Image: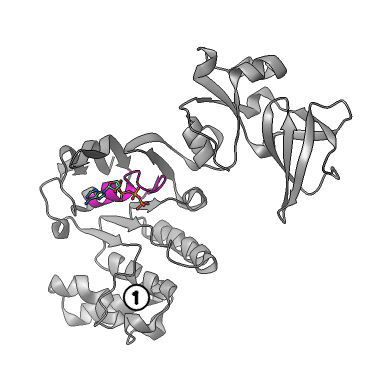
Amino acid sequence: MYLTVSNVTKRFGTFTALDDVSISIEQGEFVCLLGPSGCGKTTLLRLIAGLTDIDSGTVSLENGVLSDLPARKRGFGIVFQSYSLFPSMTVAENIGYGLKIRNAPQEQITARVAELLEIVKLPHLADKFPGQLSGGQQQRIALARAIAVDPRVLLLDEPLSALDAKVRGSLRDEIKQLQRSLEIPTLMVTHDQEEALALADKIICMNHGVVVQAGTPEDLYHRPATRFVADFMGVSNLVPTAVIRQEMPALLAERPDGPDEQFDACIRPEKIQLAADPSGMATVRSVGFLGNLTRYNLDSALGDLVVETHGSLGITEGQKVALQIAPTDCTWVVNDGTEVSE
Ligand SMILES: Nc1ncnc2c1ncn2[C@@H]1O[C@H](COP(=O)(O)OP(=O)(O)OP(=O)(O)O)[C@@H](O)[C@H]1O
């Protein structure tokens, strides 16, 4: 383990923002902290950065405990959501700032700034001021400033969320490439599951100040542990055990032991096969064209279901359909009471 957070608790007054949280980041790994607003992601990032005090627990880097080290001595690079460049400094001065306060010689600073401007593909903006740049350009410069000092860890707090969709997508790809080529261990906070799936080697999914599940994007998408994770990772069909027992008992094959209320079946929309069938168990309520996908909303004996297919099946609203689901495509998740979001 490179960076380790062990049993960290943080309270604001009587409110517990983080409750006994433990996470780790390996050398060179890209980790996303994912969860809904207010779940404690930013608080965790700030604790790691040294910007907020810890009530109990430790933060360690390569076995050295960091908890008492002030933020500026941790050697971390940080990029925040809002553009946090120094407005009265040029782009070059912003990028060189960290080296300057470490008393690096001017020619070294100049060379490093030029190198970073090339890396973030903005060499022509060296003499501009932040106010003269677009949001995407400012975040690129903030990234360059954060990596200028060869940080031991890169901390990114929703760096893309203030950007429009197109810029966000391209900068996301650039951050990934940059992180891969520099191999800087990176922790990024996001509430966007698509962003986490696209970027992360490991996703740490949080809710109400606790870690609910940590694993690869594939783990969280295909093998969510709870209803909350299944719902947060995308559209899911979550069906109570009792309903499965009655309507499709073959799907029970892989269910863990436990009372019916304990586990629900999670079936991804792309895992359900549809066929027009006048005696089928489901009726098509609506059909949506999503470009590369077609989405079918069904009323069925399993409840409301969403099914997605590549291309169109030629099935229309009001038609009866038969459903085919393989037991291995049915994941069993702990029923934590989460309501499925619309
Ligand atoms: N300084 C503070 N004083 C009191 N409460 C705080 C403070 N900072 C955070 N909180 C509370 O702690 C909880 C977690 O906040 P945090 O900013 O870590 O959430 P988040 O998951 O990053 O959410 P978002 O995505 O909205 O930024 C929230 O309920 C917030 O109101």
Q: Which quarter shows the N terminus?
A: top left
Q: Which image quadrant is residue 103 in?
A: bottom left
Rendering coords of residue 43 (x, y %) = 27, 48
Q: Residue at x 47, y 61 (%)?
A: 172
330 to the left or right of 124: right
Q: Is residue 218 visible?
A: no
- Which residue occupies the extreme right position in the image? 278
Note whether 253 is above or below 330 in the view shown.
above
With 173 as the anchor, is 148 left or right in this view?
Answer: left
Q: Is residue 191 left or right of residue 101?
A: right
Q: Which residues are magenta?
A: 27-46
Query: Dot 1, how many residues are within 10 Å of its Cα: few (below 14), some (14-19), or many (20+)?
Result: some
Name the foreground residue: 53 vs 239.
Answer: 239
At 40% from the left edge and 76% from the top edge, which residue is drawn?
Answer: 118
The image quadrant that residue 148 belongs to is bottom left
- The residue sitting at 24% across, 39% down in the picture is 15
Q: Is residue 41 magenta?
A: yes
- Which quarter of the image is occupied by the C terminus? top right
Q: Secondary structure at mark 1?
A: helix
Picture coordinates of residue 207, whole percent (x, y): 38, 38
Q: Is residue 7 magenta?
A: no
Q: Is residue 31 above or below residue 109?
A: above
**Closest to the observer: 78 or 52?**
52
> Which residue sits at x=26%, y=63%?
150
Amino acid type shown at disc 1: Glu
Q: Quadrant of residue 283?
A: top right
Q: Position of residue 186 (x, y in %)?
A: 34, 53
**As displayed, is residue 155 above or below residue 256?**
below
* Residue linked to disc 1: 115
Q: Nearer the viewer, residue 238 or 22?
A: 238
Report x, y in % for residue 17.
27, 41
Residue 165, can we see it?
A: yes
